[in-house]
Amino acid sequence: MLKLQEVLDFIKNEDQLEIAQITRVTSIRKSEVNYDVKSSFRIGDNVGINHKKISPNETFRITKINAKNIKVQGDRGSYTVSPSLLVKK
């Protein structure tokens, strides 16, 4: 398996065509990971939001799962957040 530094060095030495291919594959993989994270949540789950402006002790309930974001409702209102910011409670 390649080490991260080897991959970064490889990217530094590639031309524009290879960089475009790497970007495309990276984007696809990122979408797959986000889909897997989103799929782990269900409407009604209790979650927290991992964000500096939201208290880590506050609990939210999932009300809707959209294509890219998830709507949550808490005591102080509702938010639409990326699934990567949610933590199951």
Image (cartoon, grey):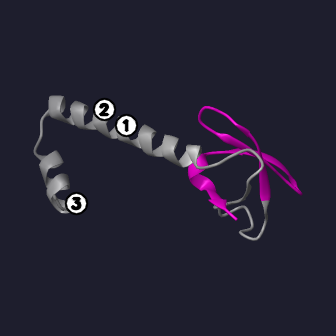
Which mark is first along the chain, 1 or 3? Answer: 3
**Label at residue 4:** 3
* Secondary structure at numbered mark 1: helix
Q: In the drawing, does residue 6 fall left or right of residue 37?
A: left
Residue at 43% x, 40% y is 32
- Asked if the magenta segment contains residue 88, the reply would be yes
**Would you say the residues marked 1 and 2 are in contact, meaning their CB atoms lie under 8 Å apart?**
yes
Q: CA distance from mark 1 to mark 2?
A: 5 Å
What residue type is disc 2 on?
Arg
Q: In the drawing, does residue 23 fall left or right of residue 36?
A: left
Q: CA distance from mark 3 to mark 2?
A: 18 Å
* Secondary structure at numbered mark 2: helix
Which residue in the protein does label 1 denote? Answer: 27
Q: Which picture quadrant has residue 82?
A: top right
Residue interval drawn in magenta: 60-89
Residue 64, position in %: x, y?
Answer: 74, 38
Task: Identify the image quadrant of the N terminus.
Answer: bottom left
Compared to residue 37, the image places residue 15 above or below, namely above
Q: CA distance from mark 3 to mark 1?
A: 17 Å
Residue at 32% x, 40% y is 26
Q: In the drawing, does residue 44 fall left or right of residue 6?
A: right
